[in-house]
Image (tube, rainbow, N blue to C red):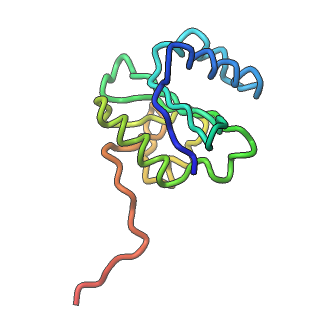
């Protein structure tokens, strides 16, 4: 199971940056000067880093946090699990976020999770509630 760890130490931003370089992350220039200010989760599979989530509080909307993620290829198929997303989203809600904004990558996933398209990107309301696949009939 992939487990998110809230920023472990002052070197976490450097580790994320190194992973971005190793994976040729296309948006690296947008982040290299801001990583120290991010709410950051290193996602671990036992002792191996599977990827990262990181979030920036939007200056003009302090209750909204922009979501970013990078996932190693070997973890792509199991990274965005219900358990992982619930944990990360609940922790963001606990630090004051009322919405997560997905700006570019993973917007399709955010829409499937019930997010709404806005001028900022796709917004997911917090606290997050999973949509039920089965509606119980009342009889």
**Residue drawn 59% across the image and 39% down it:** 44
Foreground residue among 122 and 34? 34
The reply, left or right, for residue 22 in relation to residue 90 is right
In percent of width and height, residue 52 lies at: 58, 32
Task: Please state which of residues 8 and 76 is positioned toward the viewer in this rendering.
Answer: 8
**Which residue lies at the image location 40% right of the left edge and 43% below the top edge?**
124
89 vs 4, nearest the viewer = 4
* Relative horizontal placement of residue 34, taking residue 137 as reference (left or right): right
Q: Is residue 136 left or right of residue 37?
A: left
Q: Which percent across, then down, holds residue 37?
A: 46, 14
Q: In the current view of this chain or complex, which residue is farthest to the top?
A: 33
The answer to whether residue 17 is above or below residue 66 is: above
Q: Position of residue 130 (x, y in %)?
A: 39, 58
Q: Count numbered badges in the picture.
A: 0
Q: Residue furthest bottom?
A: 139
Question: Taking 39 as reference, is 136 above or below it?
Answer: below
Which x, y percent locates residue 3?
52, 43
| The C terminus sits in image quarter | bottom left
Image height of 75 relative to 69, above or below? below
Residue projecting furthest to the front: 47
User: Residue 72 falls in which quadrant of the image?
Assistant: top right
95 left or right, relative to 45 = left
Instruction: Tell me which corner region of the image, top left, top right, bottom left or bottom right, holds residue 119.
Output: top left
Q: Residue at x 33, y 23 (%)?
A: 61
Q: Which residue is drawn at 45% across and 30% down?
A: 6
């Amino acid at each position: 199971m992939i487990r998110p760890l809230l920023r472990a130490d002052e070197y976490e931003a450097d580790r994320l940056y190194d992973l971005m370089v190793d994976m040729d992350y296309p948006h690296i220039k947008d982040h290299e000067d801001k990583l120290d200010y991010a709410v950051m989760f290193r996602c671990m599979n036992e002792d191996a880093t599977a990827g990262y989530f990181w979030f920036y509080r939007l200056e003009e909307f302090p209750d909204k946090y922009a979501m970013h993620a990078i996932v190693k290829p070997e973890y792509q198929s199991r990274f965005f699990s219900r358990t992982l997303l619930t944990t990360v989203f609940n922790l963001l809600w606990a630090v004051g976020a009322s919405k997560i904004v997905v700006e570019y990558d993973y917007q399709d996933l955010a829409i499937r999770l019930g997010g709404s398209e806005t001028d900022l990107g796709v917004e997911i309301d917090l606290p997050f509630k999973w949509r039920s696949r089965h509606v119980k009939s009342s009889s």
